Amino acid sequence: MCDLPKRPVQHIIDEQGILLLQTILEPKHYIFRSLGGRDYGIDGLLEIAENGYVTGKMFSLQLKSSENFPDFTEIRHENNGNDNDSISRIGRIAGSIPVPIKRSTCNYWLQSPLPVLLVLADIKHHCLYYTDIKAQIRQRYREFVSKDHFMFYIPADSRLEEMNTETIQSSEGICNTYRHMMFERNKFLMLEYPDFFNSVRDFVTNRMKYYEHIDHQNADPFLTQSMNFYNTTRHLHHLLQIISRHLDVAFDNIDFYKVREKYKDAYRHYDVWEEYDVLEIEISELHSRIQENMLNIIDTLRELIISIEGDFWETQYPGIYAEAEKMSSREFRDNCYWI
């Protein structure tokens, strides 16, 4: 046979990794756009499709493919106490896969306006593992700035396999379905992170103003407040809604339209112009429910800023960090008469 160029094995594995990615993350939901050219830490873009439409919502993606990732065979099944509910049995895979990345590449990722996924394609076991790179850096920021390479730990429990309709009712199928659901949740949170950050900054910086605002309730139920006052209430609820999703805490999601409908008769009876005024009876209900939401959120948010991502916030946003140190549910109670 004549002398011909030999294709490197890693090139074949890399192509297999792309095919595996496109198989597990189905093309009807995700479009992988390879960037080509030289790789500076981004292999491609992953665009989200919804109901047959492209959305313009994208992730940057670094894909690493190999046949030599660890073989995680120990799956511990947990049950929430309901033996009849098969979906409650979730298989947890212990361990993680360490992946060292140069700090210069990490800096490149951090400067990107897009969320960045680090994805491992396990060719041997036909599965993917993934992590949100920016979240890992925030959580170990002091380590990140002190070393030339940053070690990412990709959770074994992030494992995704191809969805199989024939085995979906099996324990393995249930676990895989659950992990795909968690991937969807993580995807949503990564896309929403800029809104989360802005909401945190707004709430922590202006919390005393919001404490004073939300303390206003239980006045004469048929007095009124202006629409500007009402809009501040809606804005505060929206901030807390975004924050609660990222913190995964209990949240009373208020349907403002239904609350308004509840008091329609009162508005007609007292001849109030809804376009300009809001009855105190409506404000009192809204503020009472929002107070509970604030109590559910404040200490968990403080823990995120001071402890879980403390080095990141203290270094990059010292003003917010300093305010968060003073913030607590006790502070909120001391400034709200009606709690």
Image (cartoon, rainbow, N blue to C red):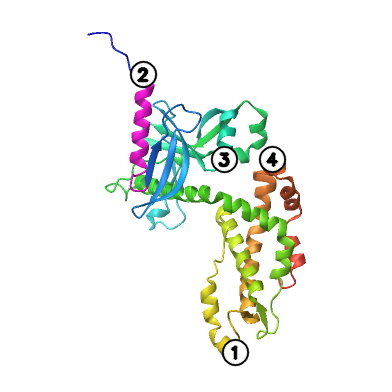
Which label lies toward us, 3 or 1?
1
| Residue 202 image position (x, y, % from top left) | 67, 56
- The amino acid on which the numbered mark 3 sits, given as a three-letter code, is Lys
Alpha-carbon span between mark 2 and mark 1: 80 Å
- The amino acid on which the numbered mark 1 sits, given as a three-letter code, is Asp
Q: Which of marks 2 and 1 is nearer the N terminus?
A: 2
Q: Earlier in the sequence, mark 2 or mark 3?
A: 2
| Residue 275 image position (x, y, % from top left) | 58, 79
- The amino acid on which the numbered mark 2 sits, given as a three-letter code, is Pro
Residue 93 visible, this angle = no
The magenta segment is: 9-29
Tag shown at residue 134: 3
Q: Is residue 221 left or right of residue 121?
A: right
82 or 47, nearer to the observer: 47
Alpha-carbon span between mark 2 and mark 3: 32 Å
The number of numbered badges drawn on the structure is 4
Q: Name the residue under label 2.
A: 8
In what element is the residue under mark 2? loop
Note whether 95 is above or below 193 in the view shown: above
Q: Is residue 225 left or right of residue 190?
A: right
Q: Residue furthest left?
A: 1
Alpha-carbon span between mark 2 and mark 4: 42 Å
Tag shown at residue 175: none
Note whether 264 is above or below 322 in the view shown: below
Q: Which of marks 4 and 1 is nearer the N terminus?
A: 1
